[in-house]
Image (spheres, rainbow, N blue to C red):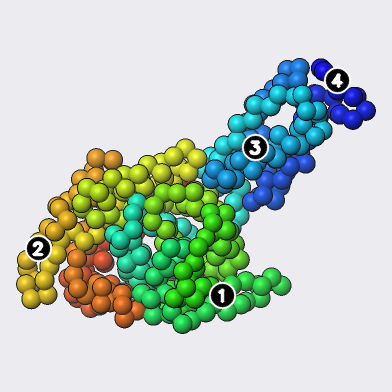
């Protein structure tokens, strides 16, 4: 046992190890590791301690902090000469569902994601939300794209700011309302012309507050416009809320499809395990306004559709590249609100397929 003064250190027993672990809080759940049932496979042999610990945030920085907390507390109470083998892992999706208590009145929470920027993810988010609202659903959007929050522009609320509500004595953020859709954007809390430099933990905290500190009320759908890519921020965010599904947006060309493939695989990770609602192929073809029957496949043909079939996930539909989509976004009225235009019909068909796939996922639970 080395020179371990008995008066300073606790005896190395399973019970004492659990007592020490019971003093360490899981930061998101605000519960200690033992009472939250986050410790598994604990073995104590001599001065060697092995265990597995789960955390709700699977991001690297969160797991590293927990690893450091376990090492520090165990050595502080049991002695510097103990050997610790601690495996820190993200909480499995089924366990996460039972732990999370936020957004209880929201029926379906769906993330809209893209492997890379510039593929029209926010445009698709805005028009799915608009199509759902047009069909009579209660809808909300969280614009979590910290690198380029564009939802306020697309709904003509750039100059609006959320108000505060008192809910049972607790101050809550009241989302901005546009076309009957509740909206919170990271853009509401920053100056439009100022670049924002975020570190991972700071960005994750800011985005988390849009869920935990806001009053969303009863919604049929809450859409989350994620930042492009598949980084640490995404892992933090998707573990903050019990996602029911994720949509991947891509253009047809190969460089975008490679990133879309990574996006699908991210949501299939064991620590995330979020069902993929489907893939949307945006900018599928170009149709000039003066030649409405013509289709020019500038970026390739059916790339995202073929990717969906190859990865055995649903294909939600094609969205053409037309000038009206850009114009609609710029004036703050999503194209789906147009009446009987080819682009509004394309988005309406996309929304119809989206609803069917989300309901199919819910039916399997």
Dot 4 falls on a residue whose secondary structure is loop
Residues under labels 1 and 3: Cα distance?
37 Å
Name which residue lies at 26% across and 73% down: 326
Residue hosting label 3: 67
Q: Is residue 201 left or right of residue 358?
A: right
Residues under labels 4 and 3: Cα distance?
25 Å
Q: Earlier in the sequence, mark 3 or mark 2?
A: 3
Is residue 274 depicted above or below 338 in this figure?
A: above
Residues under labels 1 and 4: Cα distance?
60 Å
Q: Is residue 224 left or right of residue 207?
A: left
- Seen from the viewer's position, the closer of residues 9 and 324 is 9
Residues under labels 3 and 2: Cα distance?
55 Å
Residue hosting label 4: 3
Residue 131, percent from left and from top? 32, 69
Q: Is residue 277 left or right of residue 91?
A: left
Residue hosting label 1: 174
> Residue 297 occupies which quadrant of the picture?
bottom left
Name which residue lies at 73% across and 42% down: 24
Q: Which mark is residue 295?
A: 2
The answer to whether mark 2 and mark 4 are in CB contact below 8 A is no
Is residue 223 depicted above or below 274 in this figure?
A: below
How many residues crowd mark 3 within 10 Å: few (<14), some (14–19), many (20+)?
some
The answer to whether mark 3 and mark 2 are in CB contact below 8 A is no
How many residues crowd mark 1 within 10 Å: few (<14), some (14–19), many (20+)?
many
Whether residue 42 can be seen here: no
């Amino acid at each position: 046992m080395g020179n371990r003064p008995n008066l300073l250190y606790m005896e190395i027993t399973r019970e004492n190890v659990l007592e020490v672990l019971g003093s360490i809080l899981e930061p998101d759940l605000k519960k200690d590791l033992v009472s939250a049932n986050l410790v598994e496979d604990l073995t104590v042999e001599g001065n060697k301690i092995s265990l597995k610990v789960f955390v709700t945030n699977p991001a690297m920085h969160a797991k590293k902090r927990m690893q450091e907390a376990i090492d520090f507390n165990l050595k502080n109470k049991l002695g510097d000469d103990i050997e610790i083998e601690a495996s820190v892992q993200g909480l499995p999706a089924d366990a996460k569902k039972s732990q999370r208590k936020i957004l209880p009145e929201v029926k379906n929470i769906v993330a809209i994601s893209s492997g890379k920027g510039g593929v029209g993810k926010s445009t698709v988010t805005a028009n799915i939300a608009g199509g759902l609202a047009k069909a009579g659903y209660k809808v909300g959007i969280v614009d979590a794209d910290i690198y380029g929050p564009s939802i306020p522009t697309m709904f003509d609320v750039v100059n609006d700011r959320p108000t505060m509500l008192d809910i049972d004595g607790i101050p809550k953020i009241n989302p901005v309302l546009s076309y009957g859709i509740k909206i919170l954007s990271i853009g509401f809390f920053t100056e439009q012309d100022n670049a924002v430099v975020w570190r991972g933990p700071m960005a994750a905290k800011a985005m988390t507050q849009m869920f935990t500190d806001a009053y969303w009320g009863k919604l049929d759908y809450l859409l989350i416009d994620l930042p492009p890519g598949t980084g640490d921020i995404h892992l933090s965010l998707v573990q903050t809320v019990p996602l029911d599904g994720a949509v991947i947006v891509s253009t047809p060309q190969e460089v975008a499809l490679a990133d879309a493939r990574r996006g699908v695989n991210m949501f299939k990770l064991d620590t995330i395990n979020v069902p993929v609602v489907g893939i949307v192929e945006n900018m599928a073809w170009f149709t000039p306004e003066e030649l409405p029957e013509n289709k020019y496949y500038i970026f390739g043909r059916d790339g995202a559709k073929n990717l969906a079939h190859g990865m055995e996930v649903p294909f939600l539909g094609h969205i053409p590249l037309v000038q009206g989509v850009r114009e609609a976004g710029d004036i703050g009225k999503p194209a789906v609100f147009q009446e009987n235009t080819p682009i509004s019909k394309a988005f309406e068909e996309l929304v119809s397929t989206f609803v069917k796939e989300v309901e199919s996922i819910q039916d399997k639970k």
